[in-house]
Image (tube, coloured by chain):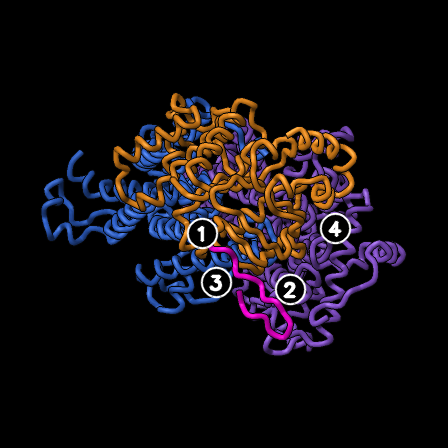
Chain colours: A orange, B purple, C blue
């Protein structure tokens, strides 16, 4: 706590025990900020969801936090350290649609990409590592597809492969961009099981999420965004009709809010 | 009168005048038809088309010689080049439709292989009638030196015809270039129009062969279109601006080339177009680099200024040096980061605007309007004065920031 | 196949093969990145590069010209990137603007300067001259062990051999980075891999390969070497590793068969003169691609493409 001067109260520095802390982040495509002056704190050992309408800057926030897209201003801390000193502790699951699934490679190959940072440029992929990659595939139920070309997979299977690749990274913070978009119910179940297991092992999970009806079941912590931060905190206290209305505007209120309030009340 | 002005005023001989007029017409046709390609994001298809003319030139020569002609009839050579260019086009379409290869690979493959066939044919010609092939190489780089009167006529007439065809086809092509699905919904045969568009590009290429050569004709199809894009956002107008840029480059290039020795027509025309492009890239209002840099700087300043004021309003310290400098320059904070009276007032206004937005989101059912929030757009630009008064009524009286 | 073969055909075949392989290797990644046409752009600016190098040095020497061509390629790549970013122009059009302008400038400078005294003509640079790269001193296979004869090998051979070895080494060394940043750029950057630098390095390598290959096969036919063997290879397999091997095989086959057909083919038809070997190499590579398009086991799209998945 910095001493207050001249009547001002200084902001506390970002908590160093947070898995991911974002301060004053602004990202802009051209002349329109997609994310404006956002502060966000995602606690460790917690399942967090980033929620907001389409075009509200959810994925942008995630990618800027990873340093994958440039930011206009702001500071990113991962477990209290700048992103470049903490890359080994982050695993990333990009949007499925962001890659060319016609690429000539196999399922096992893609999972092994998660090990590239560990093995370096020329380091041999040891037997133990290859076994780990297979093990990660097994954790998402894809062990029998190891040698398939990735283009032959269903959407849900592709998402599982991406999750297996992130598991292979063996990180402490998992960042997922719309992991449930366009996947089948069985895959959604399988993915959430894996994520819950990660959480029970003490890892932090942050996912961009768009299905409001499952937020209460899947996550403990929410971050509501619509270009700027609307609200953040535990699901129980923060995921309310008021914050949702502030995030989505009137339109959502008419259709979903009652339903969600009922679902919330039933818990 | 200097040679340049003589040529400019079409006084430098009958051939030179015809070539200048032909180059202007060709430039116009190339610029406007190239625009359709550019807008379809297929600019480099023209490169493949151009290179695919070479085997046609060779084949036509061989056929004409074996039929007893002398093989140098420009019309015959152009017909041959049109034939292989068309085959090249169909090959690109076939590869992209039937295999997993993307269009860029198909373009490159057709370009390289057809050019290779052309080179093989040129060596065949060299061996079959040494000396008589003279002039075929000029199709690579174009040459107006020693051009016959009838060649100049072919260029002038061909240029006029392509301009006419562009004008005739402008509506369906504009429609397809901007929104293929919409055109299909209106009942247009998109594939047919695409092929017509390519046919026009091919005609321009073939007519331009003698004048600028097969490698540089590509420039006349691409550069004017790209240049025009800097000057207008309006769909229909791009085509005519591109035509004008192309026509001007063609005319000026031909004139410059005629006014001095060792100034080959093709490269000069291309370089004139390139100069127009660079000027547009740098100085065009709106899309030009200079305008964009100025806009970005003011935008960045706006973002930082507002973030700074928000921090003041929330009584947070300002972390970034740039923000601090910006606010200090406006007299909103003291150098040590403490807000001045004016800074407090501004911060209060900004904080109030944020709360007005909160109210707006609550009471407005229209996501389109509230969705315009991006942090920097003033609320006065989105809502009317009486709407804002209504927000204020709900918010209660203003509060001061800091020190209060 | 004796003394005559060693003297007249061995070195051109070797040079053609090495050039084809040096181009095909980076070509694999360019195609997967939808950047196949950067090879087109690079190969067109080779001409202005060598013309400027000649103007600056005043001599027709291999090294300055290669440096000039490589310099022009780098300038072109930077300009393309600048036009793309500054003007918001799509990549194809940006390439078209840059390389045609540079090519025009090259031709203009060439016409302006007095080049009649040098053996530097546009057609050579455009069409290549593989046939002239013969081994004068060779008088049979034994010459391969004769230091005097070896010293008279055409300079192009060691040059392209070095470049080819370099391309192979870079491909092996950066294999993982190339693969992952081509497949999933965002993930690569999240791993801390400098994707942008990998992309630039790839283009630079392609430029060096194009420059080293142009005096053998000519600057335009280089495009066919970049694209046809890897494109055909893509239709043969769904594994990147195997695709690369296929592309090397196709490149070699194109070079050898193309040279043989150019040299001996016309004789079979009763003609007395050989045809352009460089052109024939491109034709053979095109024929291989055509066959792969018709019969390649993995020729059709089955996966969910980038667009469909969105």
* Quadrant in which the C terminus of chain A is drawn: top right
The image's mark for residue B311 is 2
Please state the extent of the stretch shown in magenta in the rendering: A1-16
Q: CA distance from mark 2 to mark 4?
A: 22 Å
Please indicate, yes or no, whether residue B183 appears anywhere in the rendered image. no
In the image, residue A162 lies at what x, y percent? Answer: 46, 34
Circles 1 and 3: CB atoms closer than 8 Å: no
In the image, are marks 1 and 3 on the same chain? Answer: no
Circles 1 and 2: CB atoms closer than 8 Å: no
Mark nearest the camera among 1 and 4 is 1
Left or right placement of residue A189 versus residue A29 in this view: left
Q: CA distance from mark 4 to mark 3?
A: 58 Å
Q: Main secondary structure of the magenta part?
A: loop
Say which element carries label 1: loop
Query: Which residue is label 4 attached to?
Result: B372
Mark nearest the camera among 1 and 3 is 1
Depth check: give the residue in front, B373 or B164: B373
Is-magenta flag for residue A4? yes
Query: Which residue is label 3 attached to?
Result: C111
Q: CA distance from mark 1 to mark 4?
A: 34 Å
Identify which residue is drawn at 31% across, 46% down: A121
């Amino acid at each position: 706590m910095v001493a207050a001067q001249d009547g001002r109260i200084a902001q506390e520095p970002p908590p160093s025990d947070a898995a991911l802390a974002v301060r004053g982040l602004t990202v802009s495509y051209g002349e329109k900020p997609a994310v404006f002056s956002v502060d966000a704190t995602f606690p460790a050992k917690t399942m967090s969801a980033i929620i907001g309408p389409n075009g509200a800057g959810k994925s942008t926030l995630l990618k800027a936090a990873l340093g994958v897209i440039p930011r206009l201003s702001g500071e990113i801390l991962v477990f209290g350290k700048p992103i470049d000193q903490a890359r080994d502790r982050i695993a990333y699951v990009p949007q499925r649609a962001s890659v060319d699934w016609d690429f000539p490679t196999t399922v096992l190959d893609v999972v092994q990409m998660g090990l590239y940072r560990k093995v370096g440029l020329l380091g041999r992929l040891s037997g133990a590592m290859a076994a780990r990659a297979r093990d990660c595939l097994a954790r998402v139920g894809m062990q029998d597809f190891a040698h398939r070309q990735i283009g032959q997979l269903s959407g849900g299977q592709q998402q599982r492969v991406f999750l297996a690749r992130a598991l292979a990274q063996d990180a402490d913070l998992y960042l997922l961009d719309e992991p449930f978009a366009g996947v089948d119910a069985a895959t959604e179940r399988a993915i959430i099981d894996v994520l819950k297991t990660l959480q029970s092992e003490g890892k932090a999970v942050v996912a961009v999420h768009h299905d409001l009806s499952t937020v209460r079941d899947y996550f403990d912590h929410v971050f509501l965004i619509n270009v700027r931060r609307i609200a953040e905190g535990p699901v129980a206290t923060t995921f309310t009709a008021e914050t949702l209305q502030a995030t989505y505007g009137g339109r959502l209120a008419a259709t979903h809010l009652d339903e969600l309030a009922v679902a919330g009340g039933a818990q | 009168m200097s040679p340049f002005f003589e040529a400019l005023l079409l006084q430098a001989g009958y051939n030179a005048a015809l070539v200048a007029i032909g180059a202007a017409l060709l430039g116009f046709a190339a610029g406007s038809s190239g625009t359709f390609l550019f807008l379809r994001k297929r600019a480099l298809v023209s490169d493949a088309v151009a290179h695919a003319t070479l085997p046609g030139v060779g084949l036509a020569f061989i056929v004409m010689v074996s039929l007893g002609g002398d093989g140098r009839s420009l019309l015959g050579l152009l017909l041959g080049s049109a034939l292989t260019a068309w085959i090249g086009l169909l090959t690109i379409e076939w590869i992209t439709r039937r295999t997993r290869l993307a269009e860029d690979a198909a373009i490159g493959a057709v370009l390289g292989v057809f050019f290779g066939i052309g080179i093989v044919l040129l060596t065949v010609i060299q061996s079959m009638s040494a000396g008589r092939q003279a002039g075929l190489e000029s199709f690579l780089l174009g040459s107006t030196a020693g051009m016959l009167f009838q060649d100049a006529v072919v260029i002038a007439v061909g240029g006029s015809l392509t301009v006419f065809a562009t004008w005739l086809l402008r509506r369906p092509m504009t429609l397809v270039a901007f929104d293929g699905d919409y055109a299909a919904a209106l009942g247009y045969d998109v594939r047919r129009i695409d092929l017509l568009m390519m046919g026009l590009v091919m005609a321009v290429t073939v007519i331009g062969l003698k004048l600028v050569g097969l490698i540089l004709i590509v420039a006349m199809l691409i550069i004017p279109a790209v240049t025009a894009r800097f000057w207008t956002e309006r769909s229909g107008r791009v085509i005519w601006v591109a035509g004008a840029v192309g026509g001007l480059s063609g005319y000026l290039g031909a004139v410059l080339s005629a006014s001095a020795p060792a100034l080959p027509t093709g490269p000069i025309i291309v370089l004139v177009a390139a100069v127009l492009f660079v000027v547009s890239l740098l100085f065009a209002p709106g899309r030009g680099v200079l305008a964009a840099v100025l806009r970005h700087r003011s935008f960045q300043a706006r973002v930082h200024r507002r973030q700074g004021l928000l921090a003041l309003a929330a009584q947070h310290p300002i972390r970034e040096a740039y923000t601090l400098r910006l606010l200090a320059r406006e007299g909103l904070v003291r150098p040590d980061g403490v807000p001045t009276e004016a800074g407090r007032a501004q911060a209060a206004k900004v904080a109030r605007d944020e709360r007005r937005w909160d109210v707006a989101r609550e009471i407005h059912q229209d996501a389109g309007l509230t969705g315009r929030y991006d942090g920097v757009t003033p609320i006065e630009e989105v809502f009317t004065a009486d709407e804002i008064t209504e927000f204020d009524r709900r918010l209660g009286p203003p509060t001061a920031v800091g020190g209060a | 196949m004796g003394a005559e073969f060693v003297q007249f055909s061995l070195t051109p075949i070797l040079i053609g093969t090495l050039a084809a392989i040096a181009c095909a290797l980076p070509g694999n990644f360019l195609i997967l990145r939808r950047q196949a046409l950067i090879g087109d752009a690079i190969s067109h600016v080779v001409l202005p590069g060598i013309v400027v190098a000649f103007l600056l040095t005043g001599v027709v020497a291999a090294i300055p010209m290669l440096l000039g061509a490589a310099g022009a390629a780098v300038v072109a790549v930077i300009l393309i990137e600048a036009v793309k970013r500054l003007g918001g122009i799509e990549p194809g059009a940006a390439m078209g603007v840059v390389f045609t302008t540079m090519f025009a400038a090259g031709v203009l400078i060439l016409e302006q300067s007095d080049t009649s005294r040098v053996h530097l003509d546009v057609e050579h640079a455009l069409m290549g001259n593989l046939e002239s790269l013969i081994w004068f001193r060779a008088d049979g296979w034994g010459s391969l062990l004769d230091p005097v004869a070896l010293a008279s090998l055409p300079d192009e051979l060691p040059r392209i051999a070095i470049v080819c070895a370099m391309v192979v080494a870079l491909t092996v060394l950066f294999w993982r980075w190339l693969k992952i940043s081509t497949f999933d750029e965002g993930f690569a950057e999240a791993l801390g891999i400098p994707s942008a630098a990998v992309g630039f390095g790839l283009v630079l390598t392609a430029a060096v390969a194009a420059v080293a290959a142009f005096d053998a096969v000519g600057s335009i036919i280089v495009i066919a070497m970049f694209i046809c063997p890897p494109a055909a290879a893509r239709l043969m397999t769904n594994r990147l590793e195997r695709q690369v091997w296929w592309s090397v095989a196709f490149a070699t086959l194109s070079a050898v068969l193309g040279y043989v057909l150019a040299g001996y083919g016309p004789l079979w038809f009763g003609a007395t003169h050989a045809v352009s070997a460089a052109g024939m190499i491109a034709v053979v590579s095109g024929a291989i691609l055509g066959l792969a398009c018709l019969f390649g086991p993995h020729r059709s799209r089955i996966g969910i493409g980038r667009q469909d998945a969105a």
